[in-house]
């Protein structure tokens, strides 16, 4: 009789542990990296029409704030041409400070080229920018040629605007364009929590 009762109790305890998990044995929930680009293109309407542009070097990019602290883990670039010296830069806007800069080799047109980076920490509600210096780029517009109504919240990234500057000089772009986006550049953002 005691054996049957002990077996039942042990069975109930094991079932309870199976269904609710043993204390201290729960798996940590890992955050997944987020990429804001598709949501930005959809919300802005800049996914409606795309043409290949270029002919002269430009520094252009997106200005944004993270809604949570986190880090950039990977940078992505896609352009409509080959460029073996495409420079990508991440800026802290208020300080006009370069946080990360590297030249990438884009060896195949119309294909995403990715660059792994050591975790680049970003603070919540601080304005940053990601820019590329490129000759070819996609000029993305709306079918109605209208302006985008910034900002756009795309997951944990709020896209504030798009800016550009002519030339090859590494400088924070200052000219705002509301009726198009030139790109593509984006990154994988991993929130801390």
Image (cartoon, rainbow, N blue to C red):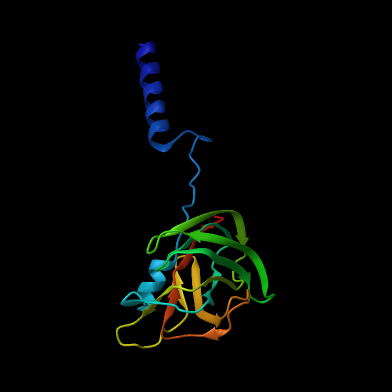
Q: Is residue 142 left or right of residue 117?
A: left
Residue in the foreground of this view, choosing between 81 and 160: 81
Query: Image point 41% across, 67% down: which residue?
Result: 81
Image label count: 0
Q: Quadrant of residue 179?
A: bottom left
> Which residue is nearer to you in this view: 124 or 180?
180
Tell me if 145 is positioned left or right of 192 in this view. left
Task: Depth check: give the residue in front, 15 or 182.
Answer: 182
Question: What percent of the width, then of the height, locates residue 130?
Answer: 55, 69
Foreground: 138 or 4?
138
Q: Quadrant of the N terminus?
A: top left
Residue 79 placement: quadrant:
bottom left
Residue 13's place in the image compared with 41, above or below, is: above
Percent x, y of residue 143: 30, 83
Q: Residue at x 55, y 86 (%)?
A: 175
Relative to 52, 165 lies left or right: right
From what the image shows, is residue 39 above or below residue 2? below
Q: Quadrant of residue 15?
A: top left
Image position, residue 93 (x, y; %): 63, 75
Question: Picture coordinates of residue 119 (x, y %)?
Answer: 60, 54
Quadrant of image for the C terminus: bottom right
Q: From the viewer's perspective, is 110 left or right of 74? A: left
């Amino acid at each position: 009789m005691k054996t049957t009762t002990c077996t039942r109790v042990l069975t109930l305890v094991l079932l309870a542990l199976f269904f609710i998990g043993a204390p201290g044995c729960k798996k940590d929930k890992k955050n997944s990296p987020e990429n804001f680009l598709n949501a930005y293109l959809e919300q802005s309407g800049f996914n409606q029409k795309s043409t290949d542009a270029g002919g002269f070097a430009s520094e252009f990019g997106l200005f944004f704030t993270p809604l949570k602290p986190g880090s950039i883990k990977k940078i992505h670039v896609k352009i409509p041409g080959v460029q073996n010296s495409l420079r990508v830069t991440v800026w802290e806007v208020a300080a006009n400070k370069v946080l990360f800069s590297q030249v990438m080799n884009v060896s195949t047109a119309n294909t995403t080229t990715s660059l792994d980076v050591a975790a680049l920490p970003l603070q919540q509600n601080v304005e940053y920018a990601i820019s590329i210096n490129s000759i070819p780029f996609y000029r993305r517009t709306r079918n109605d040629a209208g302006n985008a109504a910034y900002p756009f919240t795309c997951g944990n990234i709020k896209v504030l605007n798009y800016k550009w500057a002519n030339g090859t000089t590494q400088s924070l772009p200052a000219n705002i364009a509301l009726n198009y986006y030139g790109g593509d550049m984006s990154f994988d953002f991993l929130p801390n929590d």
